[in-house]
Image (cartoon, rainbow, N blue to C red):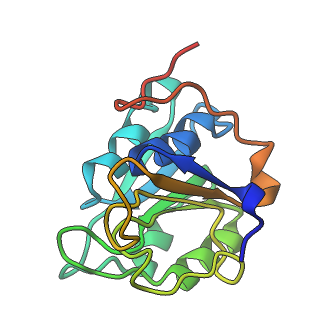
């Protein structure tokens, strides 16, 4: 199990995504890659970075599946983050997190997982699968109440992320 110091409570998945999107050390010209069909809360926090010079590169699915080769093709030398859903909300497609994580490790890309649709029903070991951070609300397969979510950040990233105040709209303050 991960060290409890690497896990925190968040009010929802969106707030957990915002911790990374707003706290990542972005530079103008950087980009983030995500599936074109992501749930809005895994799109808008990234899209909100445009005014900071961050490009959002989307990967269309093929027959409701996101192909690892297509993700690889969307990455450039300026890709800093890959954000992927464990399970896609509309299609039910379960991502190969091991393959995506290995791709990210090989390219020096931070790997974030929106885990709400799969955490609690499918096994996931963040110490084995190379995930840098994830977030999930507790009201789905974790069988918790609405508003009691969790976020995980791999230890080596805890001090490098500098999240700012994050709300329902993932707006930047400060």
Vertical side of 19 occupied by 173: above or below: above
Residue 74 at least partly seen: no
Q: Position of residue 5 (x, y in %)?
A: 76, 56
* Point 35% across, 30% down: residue: 169
Q: Taking 11 as reference, is 87 left or right?
A: left
Vertical side of 78 occupied by 144: above or below: below
* Point 52% across, 60% down: residue: 82
Residue sticking out furthest to the top: 174
Residue 119 at least partly seen: yes
Comparing 10 with 91, the one in front is: 10
Q: Where is residue 17 in the image (x, y as percent from the top left)?
A: 48, 47
- Locate the C terminus by quadrant: top right
Vertical side of 81 occupied by 19: above or below: above
Q: Where is residue 50 in the image (x, y as percent from the top left)?
A: 43, 30
Q: Where is residue 110 in the image (x, y as percent from the top left)?
A: 64, 58
Comparing 44 with 12, the one in front is: 12
Number of marks in the image? 0
Locate residue 77: give its quadrant. bottom right
Locate residue 140: give its quadrant. bottom left
Q: Taking 145 as reference, is 156 left or right?
A: right
Comparing 103 with 173, the one in front is: 173
* Point 60% across, 26% down: residue: 164
Vertical side of 50 occupied by 13: above or below: below
Comparing 108 with 172, the one in front is: 172
- Locate the N terminus by quadrant: bottom right
* Point 55% across, 81% down: residue: 124
């Amino acid at each position: 199990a991960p060290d409890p110091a690497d896990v925190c409570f968040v009010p929802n998945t969106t707030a957990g995504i915002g911790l990374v999107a707003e706290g990542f050390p972005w530079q103008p010209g950087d980009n983030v890659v995500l599936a074109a069909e992501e749930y809005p809360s895994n799109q808008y926090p990234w899209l909100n970075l445009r005014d900071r010079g961050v490009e959002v590169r989307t990967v269309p699915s093929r027959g409701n599946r996101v192909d690892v080769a297509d993700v690889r093709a969307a990455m450039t030398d300026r890709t800093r983050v890959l954000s992927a859903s464990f399970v896609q909300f509309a299609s039910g497609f379960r991502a190969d997190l091991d393959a995506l994580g290995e791709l990210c490790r090989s390219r020096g890309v931070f790997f974030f997982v929106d885990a709400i649709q799969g955490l609690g029903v499918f096994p996931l070991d963040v110490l084995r699968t190379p995930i840098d951070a994830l977030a999930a609300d507790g009201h789905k397969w974790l069988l918790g109440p609405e508003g009691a979510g969790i976020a995980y950040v791999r230890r080596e990233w805890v001090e490098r992320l500098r999240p700012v105040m994050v709300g329902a709209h993932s707006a930047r303050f400060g």
